[in-house]
Amino acid sequence: LRVCAFCPNTCRDHWPGQAGVGPESRTPSAMALLGLAVAEGRWPADAATRQALAQRDMVHALRPHCDHHLDVAGLLDAALQAASSRATGLPGAGTVEPAR
């Protein structure tokens, strides 16, 4: 997640114009930055955060254009799972299915 979180969004040029301007908070790097904060315990994995991290339309659309070949959606799932495991002490507890 760290690579994507601090990437200058080179994939962003591939967001289709007809899709409109997506909110900056849904770019892969913004999602990765939030996921990284959750994974490192610097941001709570509460319901609002899970809902924000489930908004992955831009993440999925831009995956083929990632210069680093990252699966940001998969990394976000792992970050949420790790945060839930820390909070509950149960491996895999509280995992969430991404919105598509």
Image: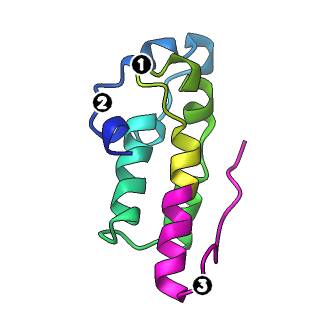
SS at mark 2 in the image: loop
Q: Quadrant of residue 11?
A: top left
Which residue is tagged 1? 67
Do the residues under discs 1 and 2 have CB atoms within 8 angstroms?
A: yes
The tag on residue 93 is none
Q: CA distance from mark 3 to mark 2?
A: 33 Å
Q: Quadrant of the N terminus?
A: top left
Q: From what the image shows, is residue 92 above or below residue 73? A: below
Residue at left offset 49%, top offset 25%: 69
With 3 as the anchor, is 59 left or right in this view? right
Nearer the N terminus, badge 3 or badge 1? 1
SS at mark 1 in the image: loop
Q: Nearer the viewer, residue 20 or 16?
A: 16
Please tell me how crowded label 3 is: few (under 14), some (14-19), or many (20+) other residues with Cα within 10 Å: few
Q: CA distance from mark 1 to mark 2?
A: 10 Å
The tag on residue 7 is 2
Disc 2 marks a residue whose amino acid type is Cys
The tag on residue 90 is 3
Q: Is residue 12 magenta?
A: no
Q: Which residues are magenta?
A: 78-100
Residue 97 image position (x, y, % from top left): 71, 57
Q: CA distance from mark 3 to mark 1?
A: 35 Å
Mark in the foreground, 3 or 2: 3
Do the residues under discs 3 and 2 have CB atoms within 8 angstroms?
A: no
| Residue that sits furthest to the front in the current view | 91
Residue 99 image position (x, y, % from top left): 70, 48
Residue 15 image position (x, y, % from top left): 53, 17
With 71 as the anchor, is 1 left or right in this view? left
Disc 3 marks a residue whose amino acid type is Leu
Disc 1 marks a residue whose amino acid type is Asp
Mark in the foreground, 1 or 2: 1
